[in-house]
Amino acid sequence: LVNHGIGTSLLEDLRHEIEEFFKLPLSEKTKFGIRSGEVEGYGNVTRLEEKLDWGDRFFMIINPIAKRRPHLFPELPLSL
């Protein structure tokens, strides 16, 4: 991110937390799984093109606050 006023240390902290989340056992990550009819949460993406492409992902909307899913991270500060 460039010219958005986000400090380097915040980005480094975020990267660390993301890496730690994806190191968790599958049983822990699936506690944050995508619920039926929703797109947010932990899951995987599969693409069938020339070769199978698979990967983990975690997606969540944090703004506007009214769109947040509190079951994903109930301790997420309102300032985010």
Image (cartoon, rainbow, N blue to C red):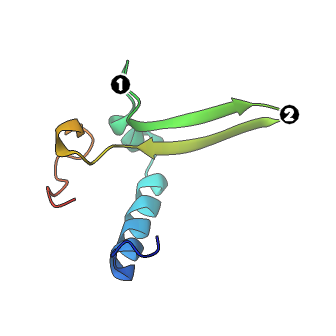
Residue furthest to the front in view is 3
Count of labels in the image: 2
Classify mark 1: residues with Cα within 10 Å, few (<14), some (14-19) or many (20+): few
Q: State the residue position of label 1.
A: 35
Q: Camera-side residue: 37 or 4? A: 4
Relative horizontal placement of residue 45, taking residue 13 as reference (left or right): right
- Viewer-side label of 2, 1: 2
Mark closest to the chain's N terminus, 2 or 1: 1
**Residue 71 versus residue 77 in the image, above or below:** above
Estimate the x, y position of residue 66 in percent, counting from the top left: 17, 38
Q: Amino acid at mark 2?
A: Glu
Element type at mark 2: loop
Relative horizontal placement of residue 45, taking residue 63 as reference (left or right): right
- The quarter of the picture where residue 30 lies is top left
Estimate the x, y position of residue 59 in percent, counting from the top left: 42, 43
Q: State the residue position of label 2.
A: 50
Q: Quadrant of the C terminus?
A: bottom left
Element type at mark 1: loop
At x 48%, y 35%, the residue is 43
